[in-house]
Image (tube, rainbow, N blue to C red):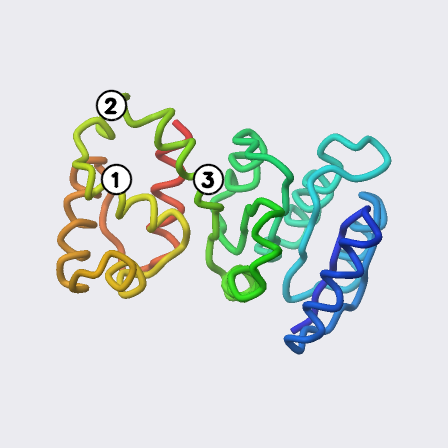
Amino acid sequence: MRVVLAEDLYLLRDGLTRMLQAYDFDIVAAVDNGPDLLEALITEKPDVAIVDVRMPPTFTDEGLQAALQARRRLPGQPVLVLSQYVEQLYARELLADGRGAVGYLLKDRVFDSDQFIDAVRRVAGGATVVDPEVIAKLLVHNERKGPLAELTPREREVLSLMAEGRSNAAIAERMVVTERAISKYTSNIFAKLGLPPSDDDNRRVLAVIAYLQA
């Protein structure tokens, strides 16, 4: 799997490169600034890009904006964004086009190699992966508003795990219940939120995230 990596801190960039190579990823470009990231994405068209949000030259959202610009030119280009903090605005901007194949993780997740590599592979495969801390903040911010207030605590837990990009089977395993029970919870969630059910897991996640952004 071909990867473009963008991280301005040398030690972290080198560490990520070594980790990914250990899992048989091919690092086709490793850059430290926004303009070089955009050029690498357009030139290499990687299977997935792993991108730091704040990079030179502005140290604001240079990495994110380069990734978004690349996705406008290459619709559906898989991008996994890394951030030091929970920044809901950046997460929402990344998810806004609704195409999927995006992820937003806190940099702390990098230290759990299995979790991080799983996220990279899921994003490359077209899934949406959002850090649990981001989802928790979105839920807390919105749970008292509109139809979200109608969800039971169990349904909110399912919703949170769905928003992390997990399948019904994975949610069932995590909550130690049957997959049939999760199907019932998800049906209730979609009914209460006014969102049509779908067999497409990624569309379900995107629909939930889009609703949470309202």
Task: Decide which of tag 3 and tag 1 comes sooner along the chain.
Answer: 3
**Left or right of residue 87: residue 42:** right
The amino acid sitting under disc 3 is Glu
Q: What's the CA distance linking mark 1 and mark 2? A: 14 Å
Report helix, strand or loop for mark 2: helix
Are the two marked residues, 1 and 2, in contact with CB atoms closer than 8 angstroms? no
Residue for point 64% across, 66% down? 47
Residue for point 13% across, 53% down? 184
**Left or right of residue 77: residue 34:** right
* Residue indicated by mark 3: 133
Q: State which mark lies toward you, 3 or 2.
A: 3
Are the two marked residues, 3 and 1, in contact with CB atoms closer than 8 angstroms? no
Residue 12, horizontal then vertical, whole percent: 76, 53
The amino acid sitting under disc 1 is Arg
Task: Decide which of tag 3 and tag 2 comes sooner along the chain.
Answer: 3
Report helix, strand or loop for mark 3: helix
* Residue indicated by mark 2: 146
Q: Residues within 10 Å of mark 2 (few under 14, many from 20)?
A: few
Outermost residue toward the bottom?
A: 24
**Left or right of residue 42: residue 115:** left
Q: What's the CA distance linking mark 3 and mark 2? A: 22 Å
Residue 91, horizontal then vertical, whole percent: 54, 37
Q: State which mark lies toward you, 3 or 1.
A: 3
* Residue indicated by mark 1: 156
